[in-house]
Amino acid sequence: MNTEMRGTPTTIPLQNPSLLNNNPQSSLAGALQGCIGSLDGACLEKLLLHCASALENNDVTLAQQVMWVLNNLASSNGDPNQRLTSWFLRALISRASRVCPNATNFHGNSNLERRLMSVTELAGYVDLIPWHRFGFCASNSAIYKAIEGQTKVHILDFSITHCMQWPTLIDAISKRPEGPPSLRISVPSWRPQVPPFLNVSIEEVGQRLANFAKFRDVPFEFHVIEQLNYDMFLNQLSRPSTLQLRDDEALVVNCQNWLRVRDLNPCIVTIVDEDCDFGNSSLTSRISTCFNYLWIPFDALETFLPKDSRQRLDYEGDIGHKIENIIGFEGNQRIERLESCNKLSKRMENIGFMSVPFGEETIKEVKSLLYEHASGWGMKKEEHNMLVLTWKGHNSVYATSWVLIQPPHMA
C-alpha cells in the first residue's frame, strides 16, 4: 500500500492486555504484530483485514477482539484515517450482525439514513471537491465538439447527479456562432440507490432545466423514461425503439457506468467513473482496495474543512453509504461494483468502440477548474485517451469518450 501522506500515526490504546494471547494466526497479538506503539493508515488497514478474515472464517471471538481495538482507534472526528476507519468498522459490525451464526455481541444497523438535499445543497455538494465537476467539464467539452454543426441533439443521461451537469452545456451551446441546436434530454425514472439523494422529483429537475434553457434561448425538451427497476432499465437499452429515438437527432450517451449502448448508434459516448475495482468476491480484497481508494476524499476534505464541520460530516456520511454496501453486503444487495478504467476500456473496444482524445481546449478547461480547488488535485493522461483526476498522485476519477468504429447496420 502506498502510505505516503497518510496522516499522523495514532497511539494504540491497550486497556485490555489480556486479549493479547500468543497465537499469531488466531489472536489479537497476530493482528497487532508490528503495530504496537503507533498506528498509521497501513496498520489500521491491517486490523480491518484481520477482522474481515476472522468473519470469513467464522471466528467470532477474534472478530470481536479486533473490533474492540478498532472501536478505540476509530473516530468520526479524528484524522482522515480514523474517520475512514470508523465507517469501515460500522460496515463490518453490520455485516457480522447478519452473517455470523451464534454471535450475540454484534449490534449492527444496515440501514443508514438517506440524506435528502435541496437543489441548492446539491450544488454545494458538487462544488465541494472536483469529484463530479471534473467529469462534467471533460464530458461537456467532448460533447460540445461532437455535436458541432448538428441542429438537433438528444442526450441519454445515465448518471447519479440529478442533471447537475447540463446547465453548463446549455450555456455553452447557447453561444454557438451558428446558433444553438434544439436539445432533448432523456433520463430514466429509476436510478441506483446511492448518494446524492434529492428532495425534489426528476420532473421538477426537468422543469428547472427547461426554465434555464428558455432563459438561454435554447429549444429544449425533457423526457423521463419510465422504469421500475434495473432489469427494466437494461431491457430498454437492448430495445432502442422504447427510447423514443429520432433519426434526425445526433444521439449522445452520457453515463457513469458501462452500458450496452452499441445498438443505439450514438455519435459519442462519454463515460465518467471512479477509477477503482470493487468487483472482487473476497471481502478482504475489497476492504484493502476500498480503504486505499476512499481515503482520497477523506484526506481532501481535511485540507479545508474543520473536523466538526457539518458539511464535512454529511459528505463523509454519503461515502459511508458506499462503504456499507461494498463491505456489508453480497449478491444482488451489493450494487457498488466499480471496475477500473482499464477494464472499462477493454469492454468498450470489445463491442466495437474506439476512444477519442480530449482536445487541448478541454484539458485547459479542466486545469482551470482544478485551480479553484486545493493544490493536491491534479490531472494526467493515461492509455485509451483517458483523463484522470488525481489527489496527491493517486488516481480517483477517470473521464473517457468513445465513438463506434462501425455503425451497427454496417458491422
Image (cartoon, helix red, strand yellow):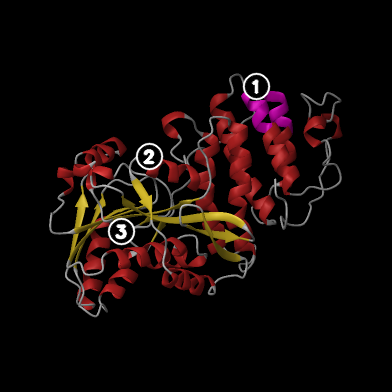
**Real-space Cα separation, disc 2 to disc 3, in angstroms:** 39 Å
Q: Is residue 370 left or right of residue 54?
A: left
The image position of residue 241, as x and y in percent, is 14, 44
Q: Nearer the viewer, mark 1 or mark 3?
A: 1
Q: Is residue 63 magenta?
A: yes
**Residue at (45, 60) in percent of width and height:** 132
Under mark 2, the amino acid is Asn
Under mark 1, the amino acid is Asn
**Real-space Cα separation, disc 1 to disc 3, in angstroms:** 45 Å
Examine the rendered structure and indicate whether residue 127 appears above or below residue 69: below
Can residue 339 be seen here?
Answer: no
Circle 3 residue = 200
Comparing 326 with 75, the one in front is 326
Q: Nearer the viewer, mark 2 or mark 3?
A: 2
Circle 2 residue = 350
Residue at disc 1, secondary structure:
loop
Can residue 42 be seen here?
Answer: yes
Q: Is residue 312 magenta?
A: no
